[in-house]
Image (cartoon, coloured by chain):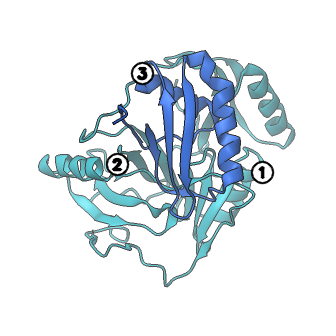
């Protein structure tokens, strides 16, 4: 957030609306410090809002580098996507970018098409996505992971929402991770009408993706069981 | 020169507003955004910038509006 005052203001608003807190506003003891607090979203996930966290030096990636340059987005399951989408918009200020049917909603907090998305299912993590510099770098990054022997569960391809590429992998902990080339950026909120994509929308507009155990088959480790950590503040 | 791809709802007024925010932030990082070219139909934009580093130019976009460039090139005039 902008500064500690904005953190305090948000904390007051959330407290007034009955949101349950995991910690009160104060100095953060996690690496980078800063000022913030933690609360539970409607499904019991712990969310932290902060300001003044120390920034590390960074470098702009060069062409052909096969590593991700930033966290792109996080997708989570909820038994009630609409109510969770409402919460993130009304309480936290996210903007609606679109819906796939009524089961997969996309939210943004920067020009990027989505930073958070909610999909219908037992509340738990769906996947975490990391962005590469561009398409060549995306292919090189996907190749690097494949060469290390990790199974690609769905990819390579391109979704309709966000016009974003995808390649999903299962990490050693059984969580799904994605590599993605940069997604759409929405420059004018007032001029943008969030689409609702219907069942005719192809999952892969390129036609190159092969679905190998995603999303239906959890047997290779895809986490689809209810998150056991809901409504419990994790250790700091 | 930085390059933005896949811009949506990138009408000239919205882009001009974002560029104005760049101008308000850039001095802090020793950066000068000079001019830009927009293809609103395909969502591409090209920004010519003088900056001490790619990272400095990146920081201006990040702080001004968050619409980060996809690519940055060090170019010389031919």
Q: Secondary structure at mark 2?
A: loop
**In the depicted structure, whether residue B32 falls above or below residue A83:** above
Left or right placement of residue B56 versus residue A44 in this view? left
Residue that extends furthest to the front in the rendered view of this protein: B78
Task: Determine if residue A48 is in view.
Answer: yes
Q: Which residue is mark 2?
A: A134
Crowd class of label 2 (few under 14; some 14 to 19; many from 20; radius 10 Å): many
Q: Secondary structure at mark 3?
A: loop
Q: Earlier in the sequence, mark 1 or mark 2?
A: 1
Circles 3 and 2 on the same subunit:
no
Out of A90 and B56, give the one closest to the viewer.
B56
Foreground tag (1 vs 3): 3
Residue drawn at 73 percent across, 46 percent down: A93
Crowd class of label 1 (few under 14; some 14 to 19; many from 20; radius 10 Å): few
- Residue A3: percent from the left, percent from the top? 72, 22
Q: Chain of mark 2?
A: A
> Where does the N terminus of chain A fall, quadrant-wise?
top right
Q: Which residue is mark 3?
A: B53
Left or right placement of residue A120 versus residue A131 in this view? right
- Residue A172: percent from the left, percent from the top? 26, 45
Out of B48 and B67, give the one closest to the viewer.
B48
Out of A122 and A152, give the one closest to the viewer.
A152
Q: Which residue is mark 1?
A: A90
Residue drawn at 67 percent across, 58 percent down: A96
**Chain identifier matching the blue colour in the rendered picture:** B
Q: Are marks 1 and 2 in contact (CB under 8 Å)?
A: no
Cα distance, mark 1 to mark 2?
A: 33 Å
Q: How many marks?
A: 3
**In the depicted structure, whether residue A176 falls above or below residue A39:** below
**Chain identifier matching the cyan colour in the rendered picture:** A
Residue drawn at 57 percent across, 20 percent down: A53
In terms of image quadrants, where is residue B64? top right
């Amino acid at each position: 957030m902008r500064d500690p005052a904005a953190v305090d203001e948000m904390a007051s608003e959330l407290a007034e609306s009955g949101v349950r807190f995991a910690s009160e506003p104060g100095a953060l003891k996690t690496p980078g410090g800063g000022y913030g607090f933690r609360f539970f979203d409607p499904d019991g996930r712990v969310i932290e809002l902060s300001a003044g966290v120390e920034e590390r030096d960074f470098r702009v990636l060069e062409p052909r580098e096969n590593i991700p340059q930033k966290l792109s987005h996080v997708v989570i399951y909820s038994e009630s996507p609409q109510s969770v989408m409402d919460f993130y918009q009304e309480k936290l200020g996210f903007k609606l970018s679109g819906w796939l049917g009524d089961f997969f909603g996309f939210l943004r907090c920067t020009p990027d098409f989505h930073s958070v998305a909610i999909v219908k299912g037992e509340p738990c993590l769906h996947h975490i996505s990391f962005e590469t510099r561009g398409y060549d770098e995306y292919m090189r990054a996907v190749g690097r992971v494949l060469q290390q022997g990790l199974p690609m569960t769905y990819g390579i391809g391109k979704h309709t929402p966000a016009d974003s590429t995808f390649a999903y992998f299962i990490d050693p902990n059984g969580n799904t991770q994605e590599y993605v080339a940069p997604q759409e950026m929405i420059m004018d909120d007032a001029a943008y009408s969030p689409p609702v994509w219907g069942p005719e929308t192809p999952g892969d507009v390129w036609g190159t993706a092969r679905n190998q155990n995603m999303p239906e088959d959890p047997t290779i480790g895809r986490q689809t069981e209810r998150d056991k950590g809901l409504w419990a503040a994790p250790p700091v | 020169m930085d390059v933005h791809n896949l811009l949506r709802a990138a009408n000239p007024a919205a882009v001009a507003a974002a560029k104005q925010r760049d101008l308000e932030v850039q001095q802090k990082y020793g950066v000068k955004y000079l001019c830009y070219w927009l293809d609103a139909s395909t969502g591409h934009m090209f920004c010519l910038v003088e900056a001490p580093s790619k990272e400095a130019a990146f920081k201006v976009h990040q702080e001004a509006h968050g619409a980060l460039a996809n690519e940055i090139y060090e170019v010389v005039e031919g």
